[in-house]
Amino acid sequence: MTIGNYMKKCFSVLIVFFCWAGLSNASLKILYGDTLMPAAGDSLPDWNGDSIKALMAGINPYGIAVDASGNLYIADYANNRVRKVTFPDSIITTIAGDGNQYYSGDGYFADSAALFNPSSVALDDSGNVYIADFGNNVIRKVYAATRFIATIAGNGTANFSGDGGAATSACLNLPSGIALDSSGNLYIADEFNNAIRKVLKKTGVITTIAGYMGMPGYTGDGGPAADAQLSGPSAVRLDSYGNIYIADNGNNVVREITAATGIINTIAGGGAYFGDDSLATHASFNDITDIAVDQSGNLFIADDGDGRVREMDFYTGLMTTVAGGGPYYSTSPLHTSIAPYGLCMGPGSSLWIADGEFDMVRVLTGEETGMQELQSAKAGFKLFPNPCSDQFTLQYLSTAVINSGDSQQLLEVFDLNGSLVFTKKFSSSALVNITGLAQGVYSARVTGQQSVGTQRLVVIK
């Protein structure tokens, strides 16, 4: 980090601090559709404990992942941990790493193991968590059934070897990104080996699928990916068709391996100017730290050096900025300063961003979609408008766990410290007046005679 960037970050953190104080330790202003919603992080990177509200936790987020239930997983790089945020209660816990920068713990509980700057996380359909243990030159797996951790790729030595043999006997060199395909095969952005490696789920055998002989360079477009040269690939992703996307960071381009042919091509970057509103291949980038692909095939690029997250439209191939470019912290996506270290897609096509400038995870969603829609469905009731100011309507959904026939029901609202700040009894859907509540983020709980549901409530004054 340059001195100029350091000063900008310090100034921005002060802004966040004063905004936070005005919200009584709650979230910043949240508006769906045109606002970046903070999901985790208190703007400071130092670890300050577990089992607290995620917005009060100190994190240093790099790679991130979101499961089908909307829970967030964070590679907490400098804190040598992997964290989990459960929604809608927004509680953060450590699932791997004890904070020590070391390599130990295989065969035991993951939260007592030592990691060394974890840089990426991935999830399979069984709930197992995969970790790019960057500084230890290995990939590790936390088993959902036992919470034990094991090394599944890399022998801990920084080198380039092992193709055709067991992945655990192979050498990796600072693996920065990982991904899984629909069959559970593992893909590794082996950054300092200038290669993409693949580990077959059934056999555990490792091969190199892109990057020739580990030699850095920029060659091979239009030919087999295994014969192409890469330079410091930082991330790898797959789409629903099995096509592979590579953040070829040293070359400041994104490349695609077509699943049907194994042919590699540059699909974004390499242009002579910044390139928004033009073809992605005419655009330029500066330090691509991560990429993400949505269900429609649109590609999102963490252009860290330019302080932006950019999107390549699947149908037009045009490049636009969706977040970043501003001089300081803002909740407006196109007016905020940002350092996108990690990206992932979430429910409702929401885009999650690990923001290294403010040490937060932030969420960009469409109106009435993403996290809000997910929370409403899980809780069984909807609060609208949400965010709100002085009042909102409580409405039951068809998926409700609340029994609307209960003769007496109770709405309780809690602040981020867990203190009860508002109650109301009612017998059916209701218009609720909350003029006495201060601006902030709350947890709304509705309890009937036979059931209970909880979701987030945001108040803006």
Image (cartoon, grey):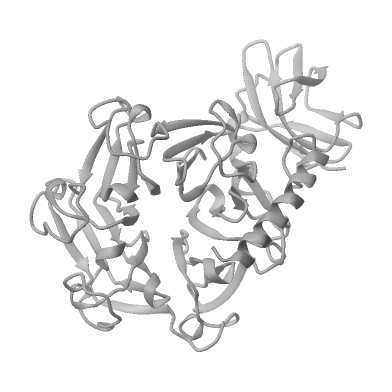
**Left or right position of 352 against 122:** right
**Camera-side residue of 249 and 202:** 249
Identify the residue at horizontal 86%, vertical 34% (top origin). Answer: 438
* Residue 122, percent from left and from top: 37, 47
Q: Taking the image as drawn, is residue 35 in sight?
A: no
The relative height of residue 119 versus residue 263 in the rendered view (above or below) is above
In which quadrant of the rendered view does residue 106 lie?
top left
User: As drawn, is 38 to the left or to the right of 77?
Assistant: right
Q: Quarter of the image containing the C terminus? A: top right
Q: Is 78 positioned to the left or the right of 446 in the image?
A: left
Where on the picture, by quarter, is residue 159? bottom left
Given residues 138 and 157, the one toward you in this image is 157
- Note whether 424 is above or below 435 in the view shown: above
Position in image of residue 250 (x %, y %): 38, 73
Q: Residue 37: percent from the left, percent from the top?
A: 66, 49
Q: Residue furthest bottom?
A: 272
Query: At 12% from the left edge and 48% from the top edge, which residue is drawn?
Result: 169
Q: Position of residue 457 (x, y in %)?
A: 73, 35
